[in-house]
Amino acid sequence: MLPRVSSEAFTLRPGEARDLLGLRKLIATVSGGLTTLPNEERILASKLEQSKASFASNVRSPGAEQYFFVLEDERTGDLVGTSAIMARTGGFDPFYSYDLRDEPVQHAPLGIAKHIPVLHLRTDHKGPSEICSLFLRADLRSGGLGRLLSLGRFLFMARFPERFDRYVIAEMRGFLDESDRSPFWESVGRHFFERDFHAADVLSGLGEKDFIRDLMPRHPIYVQLLPPEVQAVIGRVHRDTEPALRLLLNEGFQKTGEVDIFDAGPLVRAELASVRAVQRRRVTDLRALHPAPLPDARACLVANLQLAFRATLGAVRENTDGTADLDAAAARRLDLQPGGKFQYLPLYGEKRRA
């Protein structure tokens, strides 16, 4: 189903200290919790404060900044989704992954020549930017809100490219079985960490990575020595993550051959300037506001051009003079007035509507 312009007042914006209770309420709806967002007041308050400082910083090159966004239903004030950007992976907290390589083995006298998949531990101290913490309340996963949460970040990154690396990655959540267990973790990680999967994953998501350095096996792992059911999930995503993976692949991301060290979920990567949303975004002057429905308009993600970032769904009509008109409700959510500039991204596949 193609995404449609929604008249409902959903706004993507930076998280603030006042969002703490709403954020905890949202996270409580997630079975098993969120790796980078444990439902603990101290941790969430610190994340919101760190994000606030990142938005306020005068940044010339990417560092330890973390930009945290919330999706708010302005009718109720409820938070219904989250997404985030890490300006750079690595640094003081190394970025760990497994690099899956096919290594040749051969023995001519026996006529054996083949490739064996092997997992090599990789440590990156100055990595690319990362998009993360994507979550949308289950009852709202339609109508374009998932795109707003995910692609809205690229509008922010395109507007402030100096804050981010040339490349951007995303770690996709790995496969879990019906019992919410990670087959890869049970076969590999548990033997070294002696913790359950979720406890280790949360620690890593919070930047507590010394235990990985001290306990992680330092030698390559030959995939064919693992049980067949474990081999089958390496590089496979969680069922709830499949839409997010499809979206990023359609945006030009590619699988790298790296997988997460805990659940073996795939890592995808793209050059920021080559991301489809970045290439298709348009910056223009707002000529006029109109009540919805707006004739000859198209469904778009619409955003301001400020560090006090706001993005929403709206109807945009492109004019022959290079300006654009916008539906008044979307303009109000972004605090836009005629004569000002804004950016918009047409929702792919959405046709012009009369």
Image (spheres, grey):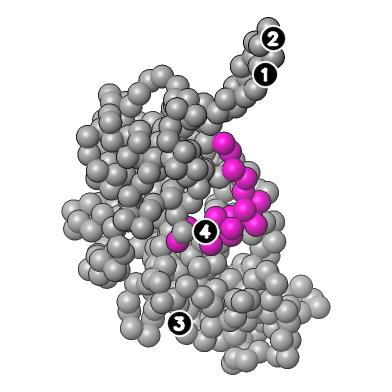
Where residue 137 appears, x then y in whole percent? 39, 71
The kind of secondary structure element at disc 1 is strand
Mark 3 falls on what kind of element? Answer: loop
Main SS, magenta residues: helix
* Residue 238 appears in the picture as rendered: yes
Look at mark 2 in the image and give the residue it sits on.
Answer: 108
Q: In this rendering, would 336 be left or right of 208?
A: right
Density class for disc 1 (Cα within 10 Å; few <14, some 14-19, many ≥20) is few
The quadrant holding residue 213 is top left
Q: Is label 4 or label 3 in front?
A: 4
Q: Which mark, residue 135? A: none
Pointer 4 residue: 242
**Circle on res. 113:** 1
Q: Which mark is residue 9?
A: 3
Q: Which residues are magenta?
A: 240-257
Relative to residue 310, is residue 352 depicted above or below? Answer: below
Secondary structure found at label 2: helix
**C-alpha separation, residue under disc 4 versus residue under disc 1:** 35 Å
Amino acid bearing label 1: Ala
Horizontal side of residue 298 vs 186, given as left or right = right
Residue 1, image x and y in percent? 61, 76
- The answer to whether residue 341 is visible is no
Under mark 3, the amino acid is: Ala
Mark earlier in primary sequence (4, 3): 3
Viewer-closest of 236 and 282: 236
Task: Give the mark nearer the N terminus: 3 vs 1.
Answer: 3
